[in-house]
Image: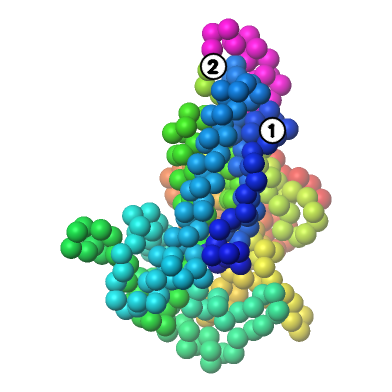
Amino acid sequence: MRSGREHGKPRTRAAFLDEGGGRAVTFAAFDTEVRLHAYPDDGEAATSPSVRMRLDTALEACWERCVWFERRLSRTRPDSDIARAHAASPEPIAVALETAELLELAFGYCERSDGRFDITMGTVTSLWDFHAGRIPSSRALAQALCHVDYRLVQLGYDAHGAPTLAIADPATILDVGGIAKGYIADDLAKIMTAHGIGRFALNLGGNVLVRGGRPDSACAAKSVAQAAAGPVPPTGSPWRVGIRDPFGRARHRAVVDVVDGSVVTSGLHERCFIRGGTTYHHILDPTTGMPAATDVVSATIVAARSLDCDGYSTTAVMLGAAGALAFVEALDGVDAVIVDDADRVAWTSGLDGRIRVIGR
């Protein structure tokens, strides 16, 4: 997780009334744009001073939490947990409970991916420049690959029982950017719930998490009838989450219905360049350091937890279309939408009746 802003501090602005009748805030964090929307319960209106205060307080708490996470997890901010662990390597340093929990959870995704997802791939990705189109030499890649192994990241406890982090190999680069936004989105959802917000939509640069169904006209009509009895839990229709067309046609390739859950897409289109007629994309194979050979152009994971979406999306790309569908089908409560290099769209059985494919 890198940041070009002053020590990773996001920019912010005051919450505003959004077109869905809720309150929203947007700011820059985690090298992307974050958009958070909080909506009133059925029978409430965001224009009510007390409701507005509750929604805005929740949004402010989420913003403050994002500032805290960026300061802890940034690879470039010198006082972050990650940067301090690199500076002290191979000795352990004290870290936040959340940092330790994120890494412990990340180890599980690394293991279940059979090495396809590895939080130490920063050792290799740092050699590539997808903006300038720089390809590292075979020698540089071979040297870097010797230091790629998530098991070199070690968690422990100090004498007081506080968590510690050690990077056993000083040449290993730990980068949690491939999984942190999912963890953070789940954390923000807990904050929303703790503030009494039952309907919200969070978008951390493409990591989408929604709760409570979307506000719509049917819901509004029902709210009017129930207003006299006071607020009731949100009962809106499913959110319609679009999956970007990976072939760059500035539209969606499919739309998934989600009431409560998260949707995250990994695609070859996100960062790539062409050199000598060959396309080089940013999803790198930990065994070669080169872009993964796959027929998957876009892999979208749908799950209750955003962490699961982040943790499995890269693996799904690398497995290839058939392998990805079989892998995700075996996961409890996790689904996938795969777009292959022939522009065919396929999905796992849990999305039957919840997905609409948009034609060419």
Rendered location of residue 45, percent (x, y): 63, 21
- Depth check, mark 1 against mark 2: the one in front is 1
Q: Is residue 158 visible?
A: yes
Q: Which residue is mark 2?
A: 231
Q: Quadrant of residue 187?
A: top left
Q: Mark 2: which amino acid?
A: Pro
Q: In this picture, is 214 found above or below 7?
A: above
Q: Quadrant of residue 112?
A: bottom left
Identify the disc placed on residue 17.
Answer: 1
Q: Is residue 220 magenta?
A: yes
Q: Is residue 180 magenta?
A: no
Q: Which residue is at 49% across, 64% downward?
A: 74
Report the residue that reaches farthest toward the bottom: 139
Identify the disc placed on residue 293.
Answer: none
Rendered location of residue 176, percent (x, y): 47, 64
The answer to whether mark 1 and mark 2 are in CB contact below 8 A is no
Q: Which residues are magenta?
A: 210-231
Q: In this picture, is 275 found above or below 187?
A: below
Of the residues under marks 1 and 2, which one precedes in the sequence?
1
Q: Mark 1: which amino acid?
A: Leu
Rendered location of residue 61, percent (x, y): 50, 41
Q: Residues within 10 Å of mark 1 (few under 14, many from 20)?
A: some
Question: Helix, strand, or loop for circle 2?
Answer: loop
Residue situated in front as seen by the camera: 40 or 51:
51
Q: Is residue 104 visible?
A: no
Q: Residues within 10 Å of mark 2 (few under 14, many from 20)?
A: some
Residue situated in front as seen by the camera: 330 or 137:
137
Question: Helix, strand, or loop for circle 1?
Answer: strand
Rendered location of residue 123, percent (x, y): 48, 78
Q: Which residue is at 53% across, 92% downward?
A: 139
Q: Which residue is at 68% across, 36% downward?
A: 16
